[in-house]
Image: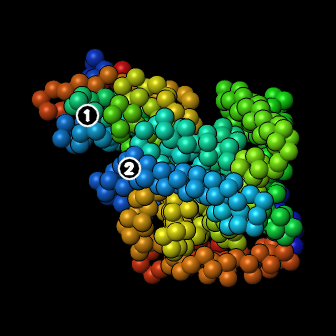
Amino acid sequence: MSGTGADGWVEACAVDDIETEDVIEVQCAGRTFAVYRSPQDTFHATDPLCTHERASLADGLVQGDIIECPKHNGRFNYKTGEATRPPARENLCIYPARVEGGRVFICVG
Amino acid sequence: MATTEKTDYSLIGPNAQRAAEQGLVAAEWYHPEVARKRMKELMRRSDGPAARDTALWLALLVVSGVGGGLFWGTWLTVPFFIVYGVLYGSATDSRWHESGHGTAFKTSWVNDVLYQVASFMNIKEPTFWRWSHARHHTDTIIVGRDREIAAMRPPDAAKLLINVVGLRDAWDTAISVARHAAGRLTEEEKTFIPEGERFRVYREARAWVAIYALVVAAAIVLHSFLPLMYVGLPSLYGRWLATLFGLSQHAGLAENVLDHRLNARTIRMNPVLRFLYWNMNYHVEHHMFPMVPYHALPALHAEVAAELPTPYPSLWAAYREIVPTLLRQMREPGYYVRRELPPTAQPFRPEMHNAVFEA
């Protein structure tokens, strides 16, 4: 993927790379992110690992606005980053995301 | 290599440190490859299967409980309370387990209600065990990290035998509930229960004390054991099947490996046992993918079977291995069963497999 723009936005993936109500892991700007496509077809980005024990959220299950960690069922609202179910207790870091020309961009600045 | 030394399983002892030094803590474990699309199908939640199975479980509890009450004082009460006891003291273990993973029902609050009820019937304190079980899944059968190792080496025959009727679990829980109701945790418990969750542990323990006090009071007022036959005692007289199930999951297999194929058993069971156990006989698969609901485990098994050791054909067959293994471990604690992978399977971290097989 391309490097970070002057405004902090970076191209992450194509819209069609992610199914509706799903998540993928993306490497861009030298970092890894989890990028989500909600049931309402909006796109969102968070840190890639569960704050509980660092499992990859891209292996988890998206249900509505919630991403569930594949390891211990910790849950987060991927739109707000809020931890909603133990053992996840620490919120997830979120990043702004937008769509342009069929591509998903996230702001990592 | 055989050794006669007793292993230190403490979570705050030297083996906890050793596990960390050996890279066994919160490590990467083996998983077979399953296509993302298929895995999403398998993880998909549904209220239907658990609603059906819970309705049947509750109906059987009511029927057997009413029967036991109607025939109380006669021998005819015995078969009713045998059934009631298994449903209360054994079937709740898998209900506790599945709802704790959040995979029984799609609707979260129903999972949470089932978790609280099943935890009480199963004499497992809800918040305490939620965190204990999270650790069990992070560091499965890692010495010094996993407090849910049922058959520690060398096995203690007396403890294992009295636990067939739940006496060890009940005693441990009684002590633990008393401690938590007084607002205290042990140093070991502090290693896996975060500070912000501890108030829940104390609150739940106090609620349990109140409930048991009410049941005992009812028995005294009514001059009858009958209230205790419904609440409290079935966690003992109905416990035997949960103990058999629980011990079959990992007992006698390898410790300190990062591959559930080497430290867990998948056992074929008939539909009645699978109803009572909510398919936890697919235990290797459950550990590999704990977010797959119980009703999808047979499909998951079919998906990954080529990578797994041959399942045990029955619970009986599993115990024909477990009992002699535990007996041998009493005099030779270093001994364990080495699970063989099929020729089609990929070994994970060959150096670890070799260590298991050469030990």
- The dot on residue B38 is none
Question: Could you tell me residue B181's position as x and y percent?
Answer: 80, 31
Q: Which residue is mark 1?
A: A39
Q: Nearer the viewer, residue B56 or A77?
A: B56
The answer to whether tags 2 and 1 share a subunit is: no
Given contact means CB atoms under 8 Å apart, are the residues at marks 2 and 1 in contact? no
Instruction: Left or right? Give the position of B289 relative to B247.
Output: left
Q: What type is the residue that disc 1 sits on?
A: Pro
Vertical order, B86 against B13 (above or below): below
Q: Chain of mark 2?
A: B
Residue visible at 82% across and 56% down? B168
Q: Which residue is mark 2?
A: B48
Mark 1 is surrounded, within 10 Å at the Cα level, by few (under 14), some (14 to 19) or many (20 or more) other residues, namely some
Q: Considering the numbered disc 2 on the image, is that residue within a helix, a strand or a loop?
A: helix
Question: Could you tell me residue B316's position as x and y percent?
Answer: 63, 80
Q: Nearer the viewer, residue A3 or B26?
A: B26
Question: Could you tell me residue B255's position as x and y percent?
Answer: 69, 65
**Quadrant that contains the C terminus of chain A:** top left
Q: Chain of mark 1?
A: A
Residue visible at 82% across and 57% down? B167
Mark 2 against mark 1, which lies toward the viewer? 2
Q: What type is the residue that disc 2 sits on?
A: Gly
Question: Could you tell me residue B54's position as x and y percent?
Answer: 49, 51
**Quadrant that contains the N terminus of chain A:** top left
Instruction: Left or right? Give the position of B305 relative to A11.
Output: right
Residue visible at 61% across and 39% down? B116
